[in-house]
Image (cartoon, rainbow, N blue to C red):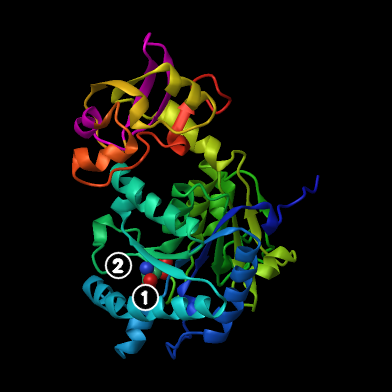
């Protein structure tokens, strides 16, 4: 039965991944300024409509290559890292100027694999991005190619964008690349292939349709896009692949242009809370007073003032159990302080925290986005 596909306006937080081949002319190596301007107009329209927009932009290596006038052909790892060092400056400027013309402030965020995989660093990156969004900036994110070495890098921005999308609980990831979407046969197979409009589950057959492809400029072929879809959809983020080779690429999706939707059964907050409640092994316990229990049940964050006792040893970002003073489990959450600091700040007002620790800590000891209350539907 044909199913109603989502519309862009259904989403509140959207990550748009832009591939190198869209941003940079091949072989001239010049930025495609008019194309980018049209995309920025689409981004600005969604932004005005109160959507949170994040961009994951490739193009550092391609632009660096052109600024440095490097010969065509494959680059060695250290050459691409050095090219990225040059190109990232140009890329950031391009985005800042283009979005700026549409009244949007861009903020550059460079991340490595560790920043998205290691819990403590993950919280840092997420908080910075959250703050940018709160300030209505558009984060423009790329891998920090100059320091990411082979074993510890994504290497492709498809999977990076998927991890970023899940990290910020985005409800949609848009991959703009040089193909319309997923075809039911790989391009190299020679068979006539038709576009798959919607994928509800990534089965081995779907994965087989991807084959292996890619162009000189973009690292990710359809395989990495399927990988990205797996990451995104299992964390509650829908994904759509569409060709950026048309002006106003986002509006083209909104108008029902060719694309492939990968749907997720979950929603990002539920998926994340399931992960906190079910997957992570709690490392310690926070015992909280009845006022805090009531506040948590009303959907508030846990503040240091409401915590009476801390048990166990944990690091910032670890999962902890939250119990009332009778020992009954109230919920679980990711804690914003390590156990040593937590012991010092409990019972104190948020304004005292800086004085006690000597640095500005978080006002919440467990933020409500990182908190699951026992017995609530998210569990
Ligand atoms: N981070 C790389 C760059 O900016 C792009 C990786 C990719 O093409 O996916 O050049």
Q: Along the polypeptide, which appears first: circle 2 or circle 1?
A: 1
Q: State the CA–CA distance, disc 2 to disc 1.
A: 8 Å
Q: Which mark is residue 195?
A: none
Q: Give the residue drawn at x 46%, y 82%.
A: 24
Q: Which mark is residue 60?
A: 1
Q: Is mark 2 within 8 Å of ligand 1?
A: yes
Q: Which quarter shows the N terminus?
A: top right
Q: Mark 2 touching mark 1, by CB under 8 A?
A: yes
Q: Position of residue 58 (x, y in %)?
A: 42, 70
**Magenta residues, as a range?**
318-344
Left or right of 258 on screen, residue 273? left
Q: Quadrant of ligand 1?
A: bottom left
The answer to which quarter of the image holds residue 195 is bottom right
Which residue is nearer to you in this view: 326 or 147? 326
Q: Secondary structure at mark 2?
A: loop
Q: Secondary structure at mark 1?
A: helix
Which residue position holds label 2? 145
* Residue at the farthest right position: 1
Which residue is nearer to you in this view: 242 or 92? 92
Q: Position of residue 166 (x, y in %)?
A: 47, 48
Does residue 293 sit above or below 198 in this rendering? above
Q: How many circles with numbers are drawn on the protein? A: 2
Q: Give the residue drawn at x 54%, y 58%.
A: 210
Q: Residues within 10 Å of mark 1 (few under 14, many from 20)?
A: many
Q: Is mark 1 within 8 Å of ligand 1?
A: yes
Residue 340 drawn in magenta: yes
Q: Is residue 214 in view?
A: yes
The answer to which quarter of the image holds residue 347 is top left
């Amino acid at each position: 039965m044909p199913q109603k596909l989502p519309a862009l306006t259904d989403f509140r937080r959207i990550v748009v991944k832009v591939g190198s081949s869209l941003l940079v002319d091949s072989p001239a190596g010049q930025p495609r300024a008019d194309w980018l301007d049209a995309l920025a107009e689409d981004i600005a329209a969604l932004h005005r409509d109160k959507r949170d927009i994040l961009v994951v932009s490739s193009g550092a290596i391609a632009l660096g290559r052109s600024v440095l006038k490097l010969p065509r052909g494959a680059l060695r790892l250290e050459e691409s890292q050095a090219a990225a060092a040059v190109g990232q400056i140009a890329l950031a400027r391009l985005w800042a100027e283009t979005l700026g013309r549409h009244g949007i402030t861009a903020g550059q965020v460079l991340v490595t694999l560790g920043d998205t995989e290691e819990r403590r660093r993950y919280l840092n990156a997420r908080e910075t991005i959250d703050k940018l969004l709160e300030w209505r900036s558009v984060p423009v994110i790329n891998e920090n190619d100059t320091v990411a070495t082979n074993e510890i890098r994504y290497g492709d921005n498809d999977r990076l964008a998927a991890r970023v999308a899940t990290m910020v609980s985005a409800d949609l990831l848009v991959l703009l690349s040089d193909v319309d979407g997923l075809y039911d046969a790989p391009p190299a197979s020679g068979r006539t292939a038709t576009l798959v409009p919607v994928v509800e589950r990534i089965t081995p057959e779907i994965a087989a349709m991807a084959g292996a492809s890619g162009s000189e400029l973009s690292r990710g072929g359809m395989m990495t896009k399927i990988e990205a879809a797996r990451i995104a959809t299992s964390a509650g983020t829908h994904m759509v692949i569409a060709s950026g080779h048309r002006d106003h690429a986002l509006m083209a999706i909104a108008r029902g242009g060719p694309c492939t939707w990968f749907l997720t059964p979950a929603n990002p907050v539920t998926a994340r809370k399931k992960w906190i409640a079910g997957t992570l092994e709690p490392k310690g316990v926070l015992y909280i007073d009845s006022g805090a229990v009531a506040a948590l049940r009303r959907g508030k964050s846990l503040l240091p003032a409401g915590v009476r006792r801390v048990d166990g040893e944990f690091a910032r970002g670890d999962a902890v159990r939250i119990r009332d003073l009778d020992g009954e489990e109230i919920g679980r959450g990711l804690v914003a302080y390590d156990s040593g600091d937590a012991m010092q700040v409990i019972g104190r007002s948020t304004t005292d925290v800086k004085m006690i620790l000597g640095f500005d800590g978080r006002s919440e000891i467990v933020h409500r986005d990182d908190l699951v209350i026992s017995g609530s539907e998210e569990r």
